[in-house]
Image: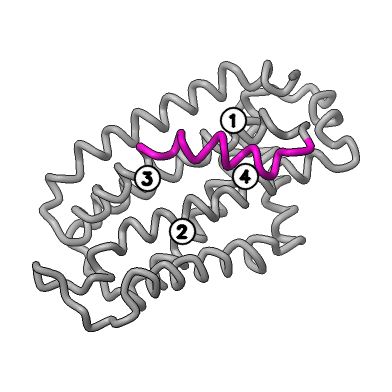
């Protein structure tokens, strides 16, 4: 399973290195979303909230994760759009690869892409919103578990819609309601990691871990049946 996962992940990442869709489309999309949301919330960077922080700094965690989730929709859609072309999805089924390995490989490839996106968006958020960091450990745990949950759930639902003509619109409809608790937990945990106290965020990290574990388990167990549908 792990060998097949490495093969699939390597294939998908090589495709992205050649096509440069992540660098040329998804990363600029995420940055534009981050900028537009920031302007919509408060075009004046000097406006301060009741606690002395700027309005943008207060809402930065939520804006960051909304930008990541919207960008993730493009990334997971892209992952299976490649397989849907020219019968590649049927060819993937006939390779004899372990379905669980295919799931883990595709999810891992999307996770790598999202980590790169999050790094760039994090730098952009720091420049635009001027957010400090109170707990690196909490922030790292939040990013890793949130990314794992988003990519696992996204891979499951993108596979369900892969063979349909309406997959581009169906995946957001299926995935966004499911990711609501992830978005909430990630925003609160990130806010605690940035502004403190960090103890307020660890309970939400446990929720993010449970969500990621649930969908990784679902993908490993059920991906074979999903691919056959």
Question: Of helix, strand and loop, which one carries label 2?
Answer: helix
Give the residue at mark 3: 183
Q: Which mark is residue 156?
A: 1
Q: CA separation, marks 1 and 2?
A: 21 Å
Q: Residue at x 19, y 57 (%)?
A: 135
Q: Which residues are magenta?
A: 165-181
Q: CA separation, marks 3 and 1?
A: 18 Å
Please state the horizontal and vertical placement of residue 203, each as a whole percent of the image. 20, 36
Please state the horizontal and vertical placement of residue 204, each as a whole percent of the image. 24, 39
Q: Are marks 3 and 2 in contact (CB under 8 Å)?
A: no
Q: Is residue 180 magenta?
A: yes
| Image quarter (top left, top right, bottom left or bottom right) of the C terminus | top right
Q: Residue at x 27, y 75 (%)?
A: 130
Give the residue at mark 4: 76
Residue 4 falls left or right of residue 47: right
Front one among 60 and 16: 60
| Image quarter (top left, top right, bottom left or bottom right) of the N terminus | top right
Q: Is residue 24 above or below residue 128?
A: above
User: Which of disc 1 and disc 3 is earlier in sequence?
Assistant: 1
């Amino acid at each position: 399973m792990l060998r097949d996962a490495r093969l699939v992940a390597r294939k998908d990442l090589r495709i992205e290195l050649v096509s440069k869709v992540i660098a040329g489309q998804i990363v600029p999309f995420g940055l534009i979303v981050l900028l537009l949301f920031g302007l919509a919330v408060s075009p004046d960077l000097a406006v301060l909230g009741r606690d002395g922080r700027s309005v943008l700094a207060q809402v930065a965690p939520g804006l960051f994760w909304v930008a990541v989730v919207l960008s993730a929709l493009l990334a997971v859609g892209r992952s299976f759009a490649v397989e849907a072309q020219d019968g590649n999805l049927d060819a993937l089924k006939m390779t004899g690869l372990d379905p669980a390995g295919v799931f883990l490989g595709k999810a891992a490839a999307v996770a790598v892409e999202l980590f790169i996106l999050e790094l760039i968006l994090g730098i952009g958020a720091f420049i635009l919103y001027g957010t400090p960091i109170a707990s690196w450990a909490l922030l790292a745990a939040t990013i890793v578990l949130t990314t794992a949950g988003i990519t696992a759930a996204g891979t499951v639902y993108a596979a369900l819609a892969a063979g349909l003509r309406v997959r581009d619109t169906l995946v957001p409809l299926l995935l966004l309601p499911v990711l609501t608790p992830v978005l909430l937990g990630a925003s609160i945990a990130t806010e605690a990691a940035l502004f403190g106290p960090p103890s307020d965020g660890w309970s939400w990290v446990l929720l993010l871990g449970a969500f990621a574990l649930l969908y990784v388990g679902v993908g490993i167990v059920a991906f074979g049946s999903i691919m056959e549908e």
